[in-house]
Amino acid sequence: MSAGIGAAAAQPDHLAKVLGEFRYASDLGSADAVWAATVRSPHAHARIDSIDSTAARRLPGVLDVITAADIPGRKLFGQMKVDQPVLAMDVVRHHGEPVAVVAATDPDTARLAADRVAVGYSVLPPVTDPVAALRPDSPAVHSGGNLLSSKRIRRGAAQQGGLPPADVVVRGEYTVGMQDPAFLGPEAGLALPTEAGGVELRVATQWLHLDQEQLAASLGLPADRVVVKPAGVGGAFGGREDLSVHVPACLLALRLRRPVLMWYPRAESFLAHVHRHPAVLRYEHGCTASGRLVYVRAEIVLDGGAYASSSPAIAGNAATHAAGPYDVPHAWIDASVAYTNNPPAGAMRGFGTVQPCFAYESQMDRLAVATGLDPVEIRVRNALRTGASLPTGQVLTGPAPVAELLGRLKALPAPADPPADSGAVLARGIGYAAGLKNIAFSEGFDDYSTARVRLRVVDGRPVAEVTCAAVEVGQGVLGVQRQIVVSELGVTDVRIEQADTRFGTAGPTSASRQTYVTGGAVRAACRAVRDAVRELAGSNTARCDGTLATVLGDRVIERTAEFHHPPTVPLDPVHGQGNSAMQFGFAAHRAVVDVDVELGLITVVELATAQDVGRAMNPLALAGQLQGGAAQGLGLALTEELVLVDGTVANPSFATYQLPTTMDVPRLRAEILELPDPAAPYGLRGIGELPAISSTAAIAAAVRAATGRPVRRVPIRPEHLVDPEDHP
């Protein structure tokens, strides 16, 4: 039986996933299918002199080889800036950039043929340092220069060109490495030609309608002849917002008039999707002798890699969140994204807020030392509260319980001390960090979702059918739709149809937005259905009750609704002022670590989190988000980094890209606040990204407390802690 809002309900696909019966995109198949494989550049930067597919075409079973010259429509794509070639034309700008695609009767032949496509390159020097890339004398990655995007914010005295004096000033430079989304399901899709000369693509994605728009442009087809359907997604975290197999698979299906299967092996997957932006962050904080913040100056440089992806929006988020969850009267903030010849960076859980959180929380720890205050006390003393304003001038009208979150964490009992007979020289440290995150899209974007609810009687029982194009990537949007219907209509037989692009958009599964906007659309459709039932029954009953089947008879009631979240505005370009976000979420973490001071090995003994969720729609799903996000933050703090050598990825495998295992991730204590947002459906608050924002900074703070080292870089390596010459 389905459960309503607030129940710890299992997800609709949980059994299939546990039993190994769930069909992921890489499990797709079709009779008479053709397999496709990609030819990728081994160089970070090179001119393409020639492409010779003769040897590949001679292999038995090879059916076609395509290059950029074969793309009938727009040869570039991009969700915010159309700058990325579907297949490289005259230049490759990053390691792994696709150059050609081979189609064959089986996957082994396709990959063998891809290896036989001869590409002549003239290797060029790569631009790999984002700070150097922004200097006037840097070689250009693109003809327009290396500044991909920038955002500036000036508040208080900064608007007149300066900052006031402060009793205590701390400065620091911080570095964040390149984290991969590391989803377990690789990029995969099945393209099917249609009788009308169009194409249908079943693909692992986060944003169906944007995929359709970009596909149609590159294929040279009207949008209504391109149908994109969601396939089983094995994790996303932002890494599926950009195109992958989409255009080559569909183009080959159209050329060969046969189904085309395409999926990336793991090493190729690491090269083919975006990663979290590496960053260099220079901060200066000033405060009074009593620890009250006076100003923040921040210069943030993000490495966007070779192409734009969602970097412009991420630069905006980095700037607007640069001061953290603290009340700062004066702010001078600049965030820039540089083009480099490193792999493209883009959306990843936290979307531009993780990097500044590590930096500003490191600064808060340094201010605590400089003022003699407890690390929690200096944070509480400066915490944002309802009615305070952000560096953008936006006033927080909803709950802002930063001080309460930190207080709850500090009140938790500490774990037991490490055993004295462990044989290692261990130092224990406790660290705290807090963060904030905007929910949904910002700066004037009309962010909405569409849902249809149909109510009918089947075998004497009422059945509710929900249609929505919100993509399920493991976060639970299908389950929350079911819970809303149960609560609104009182119907327990709820069937969810994950729609394709022939139905109205639900926007992307990103930005912690789907429960808010899709939940709002499903609620609105349910209430319209309920009103129709009341009218039919001639009754004003609050819910559809047990007499519903009698009232409906053979009638079908169907209503479709859109839900738009409260409007936002773009920031003004001079001072970066404006109400750019419709909602903020707040979370904090406490980390307890033991550090082997001789070997530099770090054990995270405990992680605790406190987060305001507005309303816990599903406590079981909430627990999964809190645990998963904290583990992802732990990975960035200690183990996860794509290592680049002159722009080339050196560790594209799970053997060498070190994800935390169950042995590395400790128990998670969770303190949940439910402070409703009156403007949100059910008072809820988006929750998915916040668990990954301050967990990294808390672990870094704990290592700093244990060792006395400054810890200015993540991931933290053992050599950073034991080598006196190597302590970033």
Image: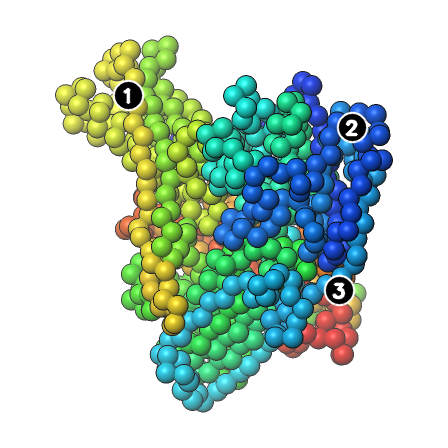
The secondary element bearing badge 3 is classed as: loop
**Colouring:** rainbow
Residue occupying image coordinates x 19% and y 19%: 536
Coordinates of residue 694 in the picture (x, y in percent): 52, 61
In the image, 321 versus 684, the foreground residue is 321
Q: Position of residue 347 (x, y in %)?
A: 54, 52
Closer to the chain start, of discs 1 and 2, is: 2
* Sequence-first disc among 2 and 3: 2
Q: Nearer the viewer, residue 36 or 229?
A: 36
Residue 403 drawn above or below residue 51: below
When the figure is inspected, residue 723 is found, relative to residue 114, above or below; the finding is: below
- Judge the density around disc 3: few (<14), some (14-19), many (≥20) Cα neighbours within 10 Å: few
Q: Which residue is mark 1?
A: 557
- Mark linked to residue 62: 2
Extreme-left residue of the structure? 538
Q: Which-is-in-front pick, marks 1 and 3?
A: 3
Whole-percent x, y for residue 549 in the image: 28, 15
State the image quarter where residue 600 is shown: bottom right
Under mark 2, the amino acid is Val
